[in-house]
Amino acid sequence: MKSQLEELRRSAAERIAAAKGKSDLEAMRVAYLGKKGELTAILKQMGKLSAEERPVMGQLANEARAYIEQQITEHAEIFKQKEKEERLKLETIDVTMPGTLPRRGHKHPLTIVLDEVKDIFIGMGFQIASGPEVELDYYNFEALNIPEGHPARDTQDTFYITDKVLLRTQTSPMQIRYMEQHKPPIRILAPGRVYRSDAADATHSPLFHQIEGLVVDKGVTMGDLKACLETLAKGLFGEQTRIRLRPHHFPFTEPSCEVDVSCFRCGGKGCSMCKDEGWIEILGGGMVHPQVLRNGGVDPDEYSGFAFGIGLERIAMFRFHIDDLRLFYENDMRFLSQF
Amino acid sequence: MKLSKKWLQVYVPVEASDKEFADVMTLTGSKVECYEQEGSELRNIVVGKVLSLARHPDSDHLWVCQVDAGGDAPLQIVTGAQNLTAGDVVPVALDDSVVAGGKQIHSGKLRGVESSGMLCSLGELGLTTHDFPYAIEDGIFVLGDDCDRTPGTDIRKAIGLDDVITEFEITPNRPDCLSVIGLAREAAASFKLPFTVPVPQVKKGEGDVKELLSVNVLDSENCYRYAGAVVKNVRVKPSPRWMRERLRASGVRPINNIVDITNYVMLEFGQPMHAFDLRYLSGGVVNVRKARAGETITTLDGVERALEPSMLVIADADKPVAVAGVMGGEYSGIMDDTTQIVFESACFKGTSVRLTAKKLGMRTEASGRYEKELDPKGCRRSLDRALELVQLLDAGDVVEGVVDCDCSKTGVTTVPFLPDWTNEFIGIHVPADEQIRILEKLEFEVKDGVVYVPSFRGDVLHPADIAEEVARFYGFENIESRPFTSTTAGKLSPTQKLQNLACDSLMASGLSEIQTYSFISPKYFDKIRLPADSPLRTVVTITNPLGEDTSVMRTITVPSMLETLARNYNNRCPEAYLFEMATVYIPVEGRDLPDELPKIALGMYGPDCDFFTLKGAIEALLLKAGIRDVDVEPVADCPFLHPGRAAKLTAGGKELGFLGEVHPDVQENYGIGQRTYVAELDFNTFEAASDLVRVYRHLPRFPASTRDLAFVCERAIPVLRLEREIARAVGKILESISLFDVYEGSQIPDGMKSVAFNLTLRSAERTLTDEEADSAMKRAIAALEMLGIHLRS
């Protein structure tokens, strides 16, 4: 009987190893271990054994069952693994095919740049203010030292609504409006639409955006203006950027300056972008004229301030290498979707 | 303003390189636009002397010349010009040279005869007979004795075509810098060089000016100084080379000595001058007065112009002879037979000249200067300079005396000298004596704590103006930037944050931001079918628009949006999903300024786009802003929307806006060949209804029961009405209700629809029993039964 069991183990192991699939294994489980299986047939002979031999043989028989079961289980696992591998192989996809893009909206390039500028100034303690686009002549001109008949009115071709109402030609009226409503210390950025009667072409638009800055406090100097604009220039064009203040004239600042940044393409060596000058003009500013402070209800003997105005389109054109101003207002999807 | 380097150097010995000069002047406030070397285009052209000339053997019009061009041996050059004789000195373009216009010249054969270059005409040097009146236009330029005639000399040097011209952008507050003297003063201060303003010396003349000329200034407010002088026996001829050269470098064409003197003085001192022919000055009288109604004048350019009583004119006894400060009359100019002239040097009020020039539509060199208010002291000095030049050029005999009507304010402007304040204001540390030095260089006088402002600096009135002068010459680049410390908290306002949130939400829904013009055409209201009496047609109108298309401020965003959608459609963009944070401008009765209302405009078209795409984007936006309580009502009478596919939104009891499919007629008006959708939300209402406060609700601890209900109702009944009725009937155990099917067709009677909802019921305190859920369903069914709506069987 012992030899029968040994033979059973050997032949079972051989046949299990040769099995071709899960169903073969199942058939073998029945053939060896089932109620009518070979092991059961051998065990039926147990009755003929002596009382001493019976437990020995019983143990051998149990070992044989365990052995065969283990063999079947191990091989079943192998088949399962193989099957999974085959399935995964079938499921292979072409990963170079394009992904499914969600429809994505695009921020207008002017807003992108404006948001950057706002961020830089908020970091310096500025708040964002806004005011009317249809404006009184008083705020747009008179209160800014540009009385009737002043030559500066000619350079800013104005759209008029009535004799005393116009479309603002600059965001500077916000200086007066804000000072009228708020006491110093004042630190505001006032972006917005401005209007000039220029026909639209690659570099002109009857409507464009300015960003006005105004700081009024005790002891504000031109050194503060310079530091503030340096932060702007570095924030917009990179840490290596330098600025240059050139004396200029605006009726509502004194001293006034135009501000250049070192060319962000050539770094100041001279190239086609900066017309070989190494510098690119980006804004105008200066110390708020004492009369303008007074017009805003601020005592120039106690307070001083600076103001500046940035052309948003100009910055955006440099930033994105856009060569035609009209693109901003045509809103062609082929343009918008690039940002 | 173009500045000749040679002319400048007469007054200030500037030795800086051209680039350095440009940079330094720019940094002290006289911005250099560009600078240019005269004749820089010419190459390898020298002075040559024609030694002999002979007929070309094979031509009846060519000449073969032997020319001494400074080399070891004479050059043989063939020319077709007929104006040469032996001994003439001419420009010679050598082998491998470049003449004006960029044309290259090489040695070669002309009809078989060797020619080692070309003899040049004036045109080939880039000049005209205005520059050299004795030369002829169609022939070789024969150098006169006003040129260096040494063979081999560079032609540019020989004829004075070697100046450097610097072009300045002068700001309107500095008319004094629109002159050589003014820029010389700035240059001297910039380079710390000596400079004194020349004082013209007029030799005593003959006779008495008062016998020939009388001047009556009848409007001294608009003409604060008028000085006149007379020159007899005028000898009209070309001016000398140095004067022609300086005029040319300044961009002015030389004409004749008298005209050139007036232009020369204007460029030198900044004071426009005029020369009248005394013959045409009836009565020898100059009346400075306002034009009379109906008067006309034919100006120098030959155009007859109607004058208005607001315009200041220079008149003789009978008629206007010039528009003051703008342009002279037809007969006021200098002619070949002119013998006696009146020089006018005057100061007219800037605004008067400006308005007159604008009305007549003729902005001239003179009017551009007068507009900026000229220095009354310079007025007289300029007249003296003109007379000095007449004597220097022997252009006529100066009559003794000057008629000078001076009504200018004689006072000197004074400003307190506050060196410490200046330092503090600018953020610099410049000692008081250094500040004085800077100011004196600019001809300010500082005495006993007071700054005396020179008469030509009308722009300086305040201590801040003095501070600017100091800062300019101390150098803006030397101002130290001071760490800019924060005294205020920088942040966005809640409104600005909500705007950003709205943009973000719309972009997340796939809409792209646009920026459109705030002004539109009034015709666009017809295009969107607004009725004639629509209040939206009451607009802010621009009185001087560029064109009708941009003549009124928009009161609604729909036309701008449709315009943009149409442009994209025409550009063959397959789809466009757009929004704009736009402003509309609503006139308010009795107020000067309109209300400027912020709106959120939406618009879209595309193959996957329908009403619910648009509505979904709006719902996502409202959810993001925490706006839950929104009423949606169908609108059948919105003129630009499809009557069956339009809705009005109400939030917090206020109208939030509208959305819908664009009316087919409007779509056609815009040429859009696809169904198009637009919406406009009022941002203020949106903001008022928004609620960004978020409070956490516990996650459910008990399971939910779900039930489906389907009803059959009339087609026209809005789904929202059923939904609200069910919600009311079920009560607080209703966690959510969602529409999952609307069906019309077989099994459903005509004109009816089946509407199916999925309900989720849940209690926060316990697990709901089936009985509770069933009873809730019975309540819902009963409630709809009351409305005559039955459960679908």
Image (cartoon, coloured by chain):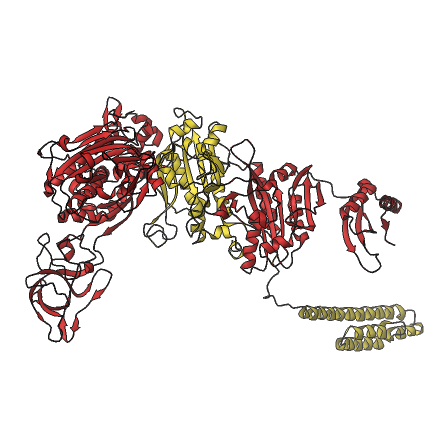
Chain colours: A yellow, B red
Q: Is residue A148 visible?
A: yes
On the picture, is A137 further left or further right than B618? left
Q: Whole-percent x and y of residue B191?
A: 22, 40
Q: Residue at x 63, y 54 (%)?
A: B665
Quadrant in the picture for the C terminus of chain B: bottom right
Q: Whole-percent x and y of residue B288?
A: 26, 32
Quadrant in the rendering for residue B257: top left
On the picture, is B336 further left or further right than B314? left
Q: Residue at x 19, y 68 (%)?
A: B106
> From this viewpoint, which residue is outermost toward the right?
A47
Quadrant in the picture for the N terminus of chain B: top left
Q: Is residue B482 visible?
A: no
The number of numbered discs placed on residues in the rendered structure image is 0
- Give the vertical position of A282 relative to B747 (above or below): above
- Give the vertical position of B652 relative to B238 (above or below): above
Q: Whole-percent x and y of residue A52?
A: 90, 69
Quadrant in the rendering for residue A87: bottom right
On the picture, is A245 further left or further right than B550? left
> From this viewpoint, which residue is outermost toward the top?
B448
Residue nearest the observer in this picture, B747 or B664: B664
Quadrant in the rendering for residue A144: top left
On the picture, is A181 further left or further right than B97? right
Residue nearest the observer in this picture, B257 or B197: B257
Q: Whole-percent x and y of residue B476?
A: 32, 38
Residue nearest the observer in this picture, A67 or B370: B370
Residue nearest the observer in this picture, A132 or A154: A154
- Give the vertical position of A80 relative to B263 (above or below): below
